[in-house]
């Protein structure tokens, strides 16, 4: 999509310290344009800190990162024009309607007023919220809010979309429909997707996966290659192998996790 | 996979410029107004305290005060002060919405947009000030009930003063709000600051002939310089005896010098600008 051929994300020896805490200690990797890139790691591994630096919300202590060809420290505004964000915590204005939220976003990003209605409609239809556009977000369910966040994150046609646990706490049906949007977007607009997740079935869908642990990048490869490298047929085992912890330790569990835990427990007791 | 075959509507985000900043200020400002327009509860609850002061305290103490107010209704005397009070509450509430935006996540949406943080703070300050002044205007509408005439010039002048004070108080509130992450802490800090400021400002009593300690605190209180021009303006439009005017509207003096209204307004404006500048610097530093 871009004239230049630079990667979507290029990270070079990135470091972030908070006082004594070394949250990220010298991470390097790059993400190709149009790639769906999964970013995994146990809690406290430094994933959010890395994402915050990539989307200009935190300043790197040292090292550098370029997103869509722009430096995250020196060209903050240019980075911001080219990225979209969907966080784990909601960032909608609950008192406004779905349409008002999107319109405000479009105006904040300076999108040509002439194309705003058509683009808004397209995004709202994509996430099945067109019919509800004039209702306050306060009345929306968790899944609807997340879908609206995704629609908003994509409204300005970002080159790179950051998704921090976009499906956590959602029911399996909503999760799979969100994946449909992600795929559709990647195909129609060539958007690069950079996401963190705790769900292994989602990680499985990524083109490549990076695993972080204690502020460092442990391994980076395609899901198939990762599994082959440790001779496992499940990503859970790959994760366990590289980080020494289960993917979901200390995470609050949704219905699917509960299922997984139960299955595992039953399997264990039936031995 | 569902067939989400989409015809893409192409959009592009222009480079940042002074125009995009002006737009951002306007968007943040408009959002505050939109919020105000849809939030009836806020309008009503923020009016309760000022109304209590004006009508309950004002009527209740009338018998006691009658001897010294030279026949002027106590409600009329404290009206300018109560206007300020309504406005201070509302401006603080506006500042609190910054804390709420942080707590409920929306602030992040603004922080990652391709706009300067200063534009967000300026928009927030102007929005909060406008809303607070509108709230003050609702109180202003009650003027007739306390024997203050509906003179267009008087109302316009008072509204202008309300806007000025609203700007400064909102800037002050924002300066406190940028560093606070929880709404609860913000409200308690505000309670601690606002009530003493209100009582020391002379909103409820003439500020001449006070005990020295109180006079000193009163003259150091910025709110004093907002209440005084309003009281002056109201008394300019009342048909009362000179004696009453001298007693009830003695005005703010520095070592015997009556401080002119323009100087008082300049103090309030300068303070507001300084507080806003500080809030911007602080806000830019938060991660
Ligand atoms: N703002 C902050 N101040 C101090 N320490 C922080 C801050 N943000 C993150 N950390 C610390 O940095 C480490 C990495 O955290 P984080 O990036 O949130 O990990 P993850 O997203 O992988 O769970 C943790 O030890 C965390 O306590």
Image: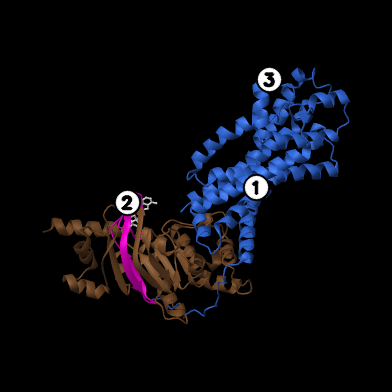
Q: Residues within 10 Å of mark 1 (few under 14, many from 20)?
A: some
Image coordinates of residue B230 in percent, x first then y, are: 76, 37
Indicate the quadrant where residue A217 lies: bottom left
Classify mark 2: helix, strand or loop. strand
Image coordinates of residue A39 in percent, x first then y, are: 33, 66
Q: Which residue is mark 1?
A: B273
The residue at the point 48 percent across, 49 percent down is B103
Q: Residues within 10 Å of mark 3 (few under 14, many from 20)?
A: few
Q: Is mark 2 within 8 Å of ligand 1?
A: yes
Chain bearing tag 1 is B
Indicate the quadrant where residue B48 lies: top right
Indicate the quadrant where residue B173 lies: top right
- Please provide the residue range marked out in magenta: A18-47
The residue at the point 60 percent across, 34 percent down is B194
Chain bearing tag 3 is B
Kindly report the distance in space between the C-alpha atoms of the residues bearing marks 3 and 2.
55 Å
Quadrant, the C terminus of chain A: bottom left
The residue at the point 67 percent across, 29 percent down is B218
Q: Is residue A29 left or right of residue A271?
A: right
Q: Which residue is mark 2?
A: A21
Kindly report the distance in space between the C-alpha atoms of the residues bearing marks 1 and 3.
32 Å
Residue A251 located within the stretch drawn in magenta: no
Image coordinates of residue A90 in percent, x first then y, are: 46, 57
Nearer to the camera, A152 or B169: B169
Instruction: Work out whether residue A165 can be spotted.
Output: no
Colour of the chain lettered A: brown
| Chain identifier for the blue-coloured part of the image | B
Q: Which mark is residue B211?
A: 3
């Amino acid at each position: 999509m871009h004239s230049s051929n630079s990667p979507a994300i290029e990270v070079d020896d990135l470091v972030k310290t908070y006082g004594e805490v070394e949250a990220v200690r010298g991470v390097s990797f790059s993400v190709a344009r149009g790639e769906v890139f999964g970013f995994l790691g146990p809690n406290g591994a430094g994933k959010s800190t890395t994402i915050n630096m990539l989307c200009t919300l935190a300043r790197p202590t040292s090292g550098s990162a370029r997103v869509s060809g722009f430096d995250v420290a020196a060209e903050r505004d240019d980075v911001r024009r080219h990225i979209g964000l969907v966080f784990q915590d909601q960032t909608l204005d609950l008192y406004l309607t779905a349409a008002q939220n999107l319109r405000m976003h479009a105006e904040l990003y300076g999108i040509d007023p002439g194309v705003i209605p058509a683009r808004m409609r397209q995004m709202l239809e994509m996430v099945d919220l067109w019919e509800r556009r004039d209702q306050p977000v306060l009345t929306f369910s968790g899944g609807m809010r997340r879908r609206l966040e995704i629609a908003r994150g994509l409204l300005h046609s970002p080159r790179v979309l950051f998704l921090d646990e976009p499906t956590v706490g959602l029911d399996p049906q909503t999760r799979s429909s969100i994946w449909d949007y992600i795929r559709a977007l990647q195909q129609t607009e060539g958007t690069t997707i950079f996401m963190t997740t705790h769900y292994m079935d989602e990680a499985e869908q990524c083109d490549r996966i990076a695993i972080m642990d204690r502020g460092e990048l442990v391994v980076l490869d395609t899901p198939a290659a990762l599994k082959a490298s440790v001779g496992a047929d499940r990503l859970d085992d790959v994760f366990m192998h590289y980080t020494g912890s289960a993917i979901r330790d200390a995470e609050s569990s949704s219905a699917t996790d509960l299922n997984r835990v139960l299955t595992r427990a039953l399997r264990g007791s039936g031995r | 996979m569902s067939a989400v075959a989409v015809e893409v509507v192409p959009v592009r985000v222009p480079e940042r410029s002074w125009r995009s900043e002006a737009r951002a200020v306007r968007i943040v400002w408009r959002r505050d107004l939109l919020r105000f327009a849809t939030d009836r509860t806020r309008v009503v609850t923020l009016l309760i305290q000022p109304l209590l002061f004006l009508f309950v305290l004002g009527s209740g103490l009338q018998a006691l005060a009658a001897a010294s107010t030279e026949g002027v209704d106590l409600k009329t005397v404290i009206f300018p002060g109560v206007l300020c009070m309504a406005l201070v509450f509302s401006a603080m509430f506006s500042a609190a919405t910054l804390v709420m935006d942080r707590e409920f996540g929306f602030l992040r949406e603004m922080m990652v947009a391709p706009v300067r943080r200063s534009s967000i703070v300026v928009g927030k300050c102007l929005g909060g000030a406008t809303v607070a002044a509108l709230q003050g205007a609702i109180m202003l509408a009650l003027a007739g009930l306390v024997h203050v005439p509906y003179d267009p010039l008087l109302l316009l002048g008072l509204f202008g003063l309300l806007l000025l004070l609203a700007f400064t108080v909102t800037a002050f509130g924002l300066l406190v709000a940028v560093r606070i992450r929880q709404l609860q802490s913000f409200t308690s800090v505000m309670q601690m600051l606002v009530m003493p400021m209100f009582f020391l400002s002379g909103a409820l009593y003439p500020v001449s002939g006070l005990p020295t300690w109180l006079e000193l605190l009163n003259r150091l209180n910025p709110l004093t310089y907002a209440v005084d021009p309003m009281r002056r303006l109201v008394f300019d439009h009342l048909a009362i005896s000179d004696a009453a005017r001298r007693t009830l509207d003695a005005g703010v003096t520095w070592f015997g010098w009556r401080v002119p209204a323009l100087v008082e307004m300049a103090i309030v404006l300068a303070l507001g600008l300084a507080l806003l500048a500080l809030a911007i610097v602080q806000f830019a530093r938060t991660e």
